[in-house]
Image (spheres, helix red, strand yellow):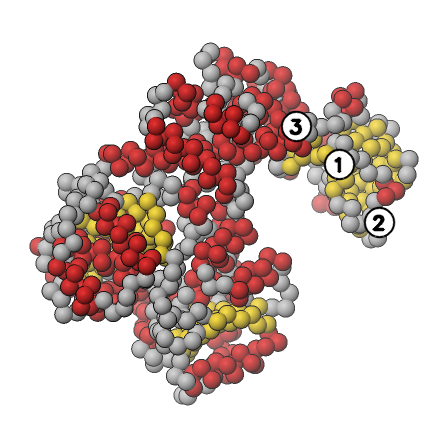
Amino acid sequence: MEKSCLTFGTMNKSIDILKTPIEYLKGVGPKKGDLLRKELNIHTFGDLLYHFPFRYIDRTKFFSIGSLHAQSGTVQLKGVLRRLDIVGEGRRRRMTGRFRDATGAIDLVWFTGIHWLEKALVVGQEYVLFGKVTSFKHKLNIAHPELEAVNANNVKKAATFSPVYPSTEKLTSKGLDAKGQRQLVQVLFEKLQPEHLPENLPRDIIEKYRFPNHFEVLRQIHFPESEREMKMAIARLKYEELFFLQLRLLQLKGRRKAALKGFIFEKVGDNFHRFYKEKLPFDLTNAQKRVVKEIRNDLRKGTQMNRLLQGDVGSGKTIVALLCMLIAMDNGFQSCMMAPTEILAKQHYTSISKYVEGLDIKVDFLSGSIKGKKRKEVLARLESGETQIIIGTHALIEDKVIFNNLGLSITDEQHRFGVAQRARLWKKSKPYPPHVLVMTATPIPRTLAMTLYGDLDVSVIDELPPGRKEVETVHRTEYHRLRVIGFMREQIKKGRQIYVVYPLIEESEKLDLNNLEEGYEALSREFPKPEYQISVVHGKMKAADKEREMQRFVRGETQIMVATTVIEVGVNVPNATVMVIENTERFGLSQLHQLRGRVGRGGEQSYCILMTGYKLSAEGKERIQTMVRTNNGFEIAEADLKLRGPGDIEGTRQSGVLDLKLVDLAKDGKILQAARDAAVEILQKDPEMKQPEHAMVRIFMERYLKPLKGWSLIG
């Protein structure tokens, strides 16, 4: 939502009032206006209106000081400020106070904003106090309480919920704490009239959910007079956010399909049928068959396919990709598959070359390491059309790479490529852009997929091939270290290989590298040469050294690979059956699941051992319990969304789509589904929203919603 103009109206004053710069609001002025811009991104009256409280104080409930204890938490008190003192020097300088009611007294303390508070607070005045009770040296106190002088207004508002807004130290020092911001919103509402905020939802939706009108809902979210009012306002505004987001995504999808013509792949021919009957090494799962059918339908429509293919590690995305490339080939087109790392690209090249062995199909490979004569030969075969399938890294998007007839572009783990990088592939085919299939092994929760990829077609491979054994996952602490070492020895004796993975978080790269090096030394003592060989791989190594170490492990020359998360995507070693993850508590759930997917790729039973210290946070325990309980990537992604929120799920932070003020995608799936259903229904009946009952929706979107980028995350 574009913050500088968040509503609309037919009269000039309706438009102008919310576009008014914030410094013109009574009580703001240039200095505070500048601070509100920098600290809260509030530039106009409209921005302030849509700057929502993050919690509310129930003004109906008061505690007595005599009843308080260390676990009382956040309380509201009514009493008299009896004392104020400034104590300490420099950094230790603070202001202390004493607050009393008929049942006792409690100490108050402030560490910031002292200069302003000293002027604002009056000893002997009766106040309503709000703050969190803590214990210091066995004595109760409240740090940084909110104090509001008791007056006729307080008495009148006693039965309401009072909003609390996010603030910062700089804002508090200028009187723009939660209370100061509350006063500004009150001043703004004194200026606003219902005509400034006309309705923006269709009447049937408002009636169906019994929503308050647009003006009322904005008043109620700031100043609800009951819990019911507050909940209803939040529900409507969440619905609004998701309804307008889904409308825009679905419109974008419709416009793209109408505007972007695509090559028509009319037939499924000899290459596909021969491979399917003679070469397919296993029966496809029902999920794989369903996905191939969905893609096949896209390819014959004459509009450009733009499809996301989700599938857990090992669900068989590569074979689906190959079948699609064979359809392209049957229709006289070339295909390319782009992967983010040379290791992953090489892996795809090796497996696809093996699959099509004996068929008259030319598969080539291109990466930055292919140079000189060999590179020229690859490029010449591609330009002449001799190469039907090419697999590689981002080297494929270089200007010198010319296709004879590119019809299908497949990208693996697309979130690792920039939008501009992917768009360069589009320009490599004429007269239409190639069909686009994007594959990801990062399971995306349904609510997030609908929000992030709402303008795309999504296919899901939601079952693993039959006979594949689940990876057995256990949690162990340092206390069990010797047992873990013993288990590793047993597995190596059986001819198996083992990964030992350490975290690598940028902020503490040096510390992590030390951990890895110390771990390697400890393992070298437990697994001495020449009986055992250990590979080491981390992000600080030169690419050639990294590749050499990985290849030693792939060839079975080393039994243990000590690595950072560089192995998360890429290495496929069916003989590796044990994954030991050190400092598990420092990994996110989805990352742990991706790492676990590196084992269990052969027919043998595989194991994942999650090593942690003794002390774990509640969130850390829940992450580990989830990993031990389930191997289902989508269940893990849902749990990750609940634990960490959408901003941390890989690839979503940079999208810009998730600028949601109130919506919690982990909890608001039902609202999202209802909003999407309504958006679909409206666009089916009235794609351009020209009908009178949709006019207010169209005007609101045209004037005041920031347009989504014409190319989405995928395209």
Q: Which residue is mark 2?
A: 139
The residue closer to the viewer here, 109 or 95, is 109
- Give amino acid for label 1: Phe
Mark nearer the N terminus (1 vs 2): 1
Side (left or right) of 137 relative to 191: right
Q: Is residue 33 visible?
A: no
Mark nearer the N terminus (2 vs 3): 2
Instruction: Where is residue 571? Give x, y as percent.
Output: 35, 68
Side (left or right) of 439 relative to 127: left
692 is higher (above) or lower (below) than 415:
above
Instruction: Where is residue 201? Give x, y as percent.
Output: 47, 25
Q: Which residue is mark 3?
A: 224
Q: Quadrant of residue 94?
A: top right
- Give amino acid for label 2: Lys
- At 48% from the left and 27% from the top, the residue drawn is 205
Instruction: Where is residue 224? Give x, y as percent.
Output: 65, 28
Q: Quadrant of residue 113?
A: top right
> Marks 2 and 3: which is nearer the front?
3
333 is higher (above) or lower (below) than 365:
above
> Marks 1 and 2: which is nearer the front?
1
Secondary structure under tag 3 reads: loop
Secondary structure under tag 1 reads: strand
Q: Which residue is mark 1?
A: 130
Q: Is residue 205 visible?
A: yes
Side (left or right) of 571 relative to 630: left
Q: Crowdedness of circle 3 by 10 Å Cα count: few (<14), some, many (20+)?
A: many
Q: In 3D space, how far apart are the residues under numbered discs 1 and 2 (Cα atoms)?
A: 18 Å
- Give amino acid for label 3: Pro
Q: In 3D space, how far apart are the residues under numbered discs 1 and 3 (Cα atoms)?
A: 18 Å
Quarter of the figure with the C terminus: top left
Q: In 3D space, how far apart are the residues under numbered discs 2 and 3 (Cα atoms)?
A: 36 Å
